[in-house]
Image: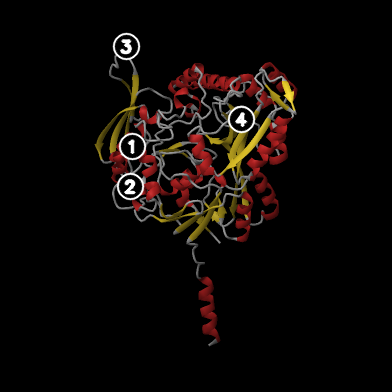
Amino acid sequence: MMRRLLALLLVLCACPAAAKDELVLAMTQSPGTMNPLIGSMLAKSLIHNMVARPITAYDANSRLICLVCTELASLKNGRARIVDLPDDGKGGGKKGMEMDVELRPMVWGDGVPVTAKDVAFTLEVGRHPLSGVASSEGYKRIVKLDIKDDRHFTVTTDRVTFDYDSFDFEIVPAHIEKPIFDANPAEYRNKTAYDTDPTNPGLAFGPYRIVEQVPGSRIVLEQNPTWTGPKPHFKRLVVKIIENTSALEANLLSGNVDYVLGELGLSLDQALAFEKRHKDKYNVIYKPALIYEHIDVKLDNPLLGDRRVRQALLMSIDRKAISDKLFEGKQPVANGGISPLDPMYSPVARHYDYDPAAARKLLDEAGFATINNGVRTNAKGEKFSIEITTTAGNRIREQVAQVIQSQLRQVGIELRIKAEPPRIFSEALNHRAFSGLAMYAWVERPQGVPRSTLHSEEIPSAKNGWSGQNYPGYANPEMDKALDAAEREINEDKRRALFGEIQRLYADDLPVLSLFFRVDPFVIPKQLKGVTPTGHLNSSTLWIEQWRWED
């Protein structure tokens, strides 16, 4: 009997541990919309990457790869070609590009194949002036889409660009969304099934699909049975929305959350302290990223229209002290929106050191020489009192705002802080509804031309359906010219010179006050494998099927 019990015990001990079927994740923001074409919230991208894929994306090594296509188009392999475009009546002679695209065999969650017709419909939405897409420029550049069959099409663009092989379209399902769009394009952003019917399986063709969504609380995903790629390791994902970063850390330590998404989770100061206390249970990765924390300046505001005022604002902020005291110096001061990690970075653009004396002089020259009760006024008696809006619940962002408030007070500027829930803040940005300053972060792709944030054609308005991300309302013909030329320049050295011009103009005009480049902390439990930080626009969740738990 004892021998049989011992044998049974050995058999039981030899059995592998049960696989972890559910992974509980957390992030600090709730998506304002789940439609991939509308809005530009990181929270949405992190979730959408689990349920669908762009046609192309950059991997963790910043290499462009196919996700939905079978092979990148290139001049070398013949899938891309420079072509003469038809005469537009303005002299002709324009060059464009043709690119042949083959889609991988993929299926929406309701069994309908993903086809070139979905691409055509996505293009239709993107080009419509009232659809409300985040940026319509990329869609408008496509002058022709020639569908060969369900999986093959040729796209023709109206110009030759250096990044022609990047086709980062997020495809939406025509069989679900087209009837909604056709009924009223102007109301599409409010009627899309992504928000009215988010658990519809036909909205997903990735490794997971949404089965429950409680706005502001949680999003639950389960394996998508029609996914044609490698089977994901977790049957179920629960993404909790915990907007307060202190509560986020408490949930992680209590075990209510397995992993906090590094792109939108713990702040850097939390991660630094967390690592000292819990490094035996977590791997902490500090990923330098193409992300910059910054302040958009509402150029329509009469107090902020003078360039000298904006220069004074930046010189009044001790950005190095903020980095040293709050981030142990790990987040370097940003002198523009293009990171030194990017090959197109230029060191020659003007840098603004902390210099409150010079800031005071500039404010005097700009007409704010009189000080009453510690606050500057102009000749009209208007107080230099402005509002800065940022996201609520982010402890470190609120601390930075308070430091800036104190520093601006030293030069006679009154700063009022307004913290809004991320969804409300994002919607206000999209409609340029902030009154003075708006503090948040932008994430870039490698060698990305910042057209959508700096070109005058990208200023959102009711006329263009609030498309575009130039929220300051910046318009400079020289900048427009440099942005257009940089996109078209194939020669890398010449393109780098144009990027240098973009950075020079940015630093001179200051439509945006850049603060620091972000380092994203990924606090990963040692059992969780396969999470690879990217540090750019295409987040780690694009490879969610590689994540696994090993006890």
In which quadrant of the rendered view does residue 468 lie? top left
What amino acid type should be assigned to the residue bearing mark 2?
Met
Question: Where does label 3 land, which residue?
Answer: 91
Above-or-below relation of 498 to 551: above
**Residue 223: x and y, percent?**
41, 56
- Amino acid, disc 1: Pro
- The one nearer the camera, 518 or 456, is 456
What amino acid is at disc 4? Ser
Cα–Cα gap, marks 4 and 3: 42 Å
Are discs 4 and 3 less than 8 Å apart at CB? Answer: no
Q: Earlier in the sequence, mark 4 or mark 3?
A: 3
Q: Which residue is mark 4?
A: 514
Q: Pinpoint residue 482: horizontal percent, then vertical percent.
A: 49, 19
Query: Which label's residue is closer to the chain start, 2 or 1?
Result: 2
Q: Nearer the viewer, mark 1 or mark 3?
A: 1
Quarter of the image for the C terminus: give it.
Answer: bottom right
| Label 2 vs label 1, nearer the camera | 1
